[in-house]
Structure formats: C-alpha cells, structure tokens
Amino acid sequence: MSPAFSIDGPFDCRSCGACCIAAGPVAVSPSDVQVPRHRTRSVRRMVGFASFEADDGVRCMKSDDGRCAALKGQPGVDVACAIYDRRPTVCADFQPGSQYCREARGKARSLFARIASVPSTTVRPPLFAEAVR
C-alpha cells in the first residue's frame, strides 16, 4: 500500500491523487468557465445530483475507470492534473490535510487494499492494476 494514502501525512498531492479517485463526482458550476467543456458531462440522471442542478447548468468532470479523467499518472505514486491551471473551483479550493483530504485518502487506501486482495489470476481494474504489483 502506498504511504501517500496515509491519513497522518505527509500531504504531498503530487504523490497521492486520492481526492481525484475517491471523493466522488467533481461538480463543475456554471461559473467555472475555465474548465474545458469536453472534460465534463451532464449531471442529469446522476445519483447525488438533483434535476434542478442540471437545469441550472451544473456539470461534473468525466470519469475514467473511477477516477477523474484529468488525473494523469499512477495514484499513490506520481500524479498530476492535466488541466491544473483550468481546474474546477472545488478542486482549487481543496486543501491538503483537510478533513476531506483525509477522508479521500482513507477511501483510496480501502480501494487499494480490496484490489490488492484480488488473486493475480483475476482481471484487475486498470486504475489499480499497476499500483499493487
């Protein structure tokens, strides 16, 4: 398991990525005009979002294999945001070491532990396959 997912720190975002894989869908408000629209999707009919939010123009970041599509690299080892200078406000406001950071790290740690317990003869999800070898 990666020490990057420790809830006690150090809180180095570039070697973590837990918030991008375990915090759930990232809401993109209509005021987040800097976020490339092709990186987002509608929240209509998504669990956790109300229909009025979709009507108001709220979108969320697309997800690839359970992680934000803008996250590049290997979670827990070396990661970066492909749209860092244009990321959603909620991402820019996310604070390393905050309660939400610690919760995301705890969820990521649980995900990695579950994946690591899958026998190597079983097909593993692409997100975690390399991280647990």
Image (cartoon, rainbow, N blue to C red):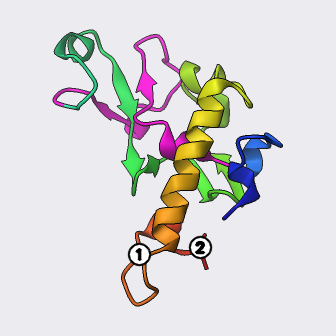
Q: Position of residue 53 (x, y in %)?
A: 27, 13
**Is residue 69 covered in magenta?**
no
Residue 20: x %, y % from top left: 54, 42
Q: Is residue 18 placed above or below 51 in the rendered structure?
A: below
Amino acid carrying mark 1 in the image: Arg
Question: Does the segment drawn in magenta span residue 28?
Answer: yes
Read off the residue under disc 1: 124
Residue extending furthest toward the bottom: 121
Q: Residue at x 58, y 53 (%)?
A: 109
On the rendered image, what quadrant is the C terminus found in?
Answer: bottom right
Report the label total: 2
Circle 2 sits on which residue?
Answer: 132
Q: CA distance from mark 1 to mark 2?
A: 10 Å
Q: Magenta segment, which residues? A: 16-45
Q: Secondary structure at mark 2?
A: loop
Residue 82: in sight, yes or no? no
Q: Name the quadrant of the N terminus.
A: bottom right
Earlier-in-chain disc, 1 versus 2: 1
Q: Are marks 1 and 2 in contact (CB under 8 Å)?
A: yes
Residue at image position (60%, 38%) is: 83
Q: Which mark is residue 71?
A: none
Q: Is residue 97 left or right of residue 26?
A: right
Q: Residue furthest right?
A: 10
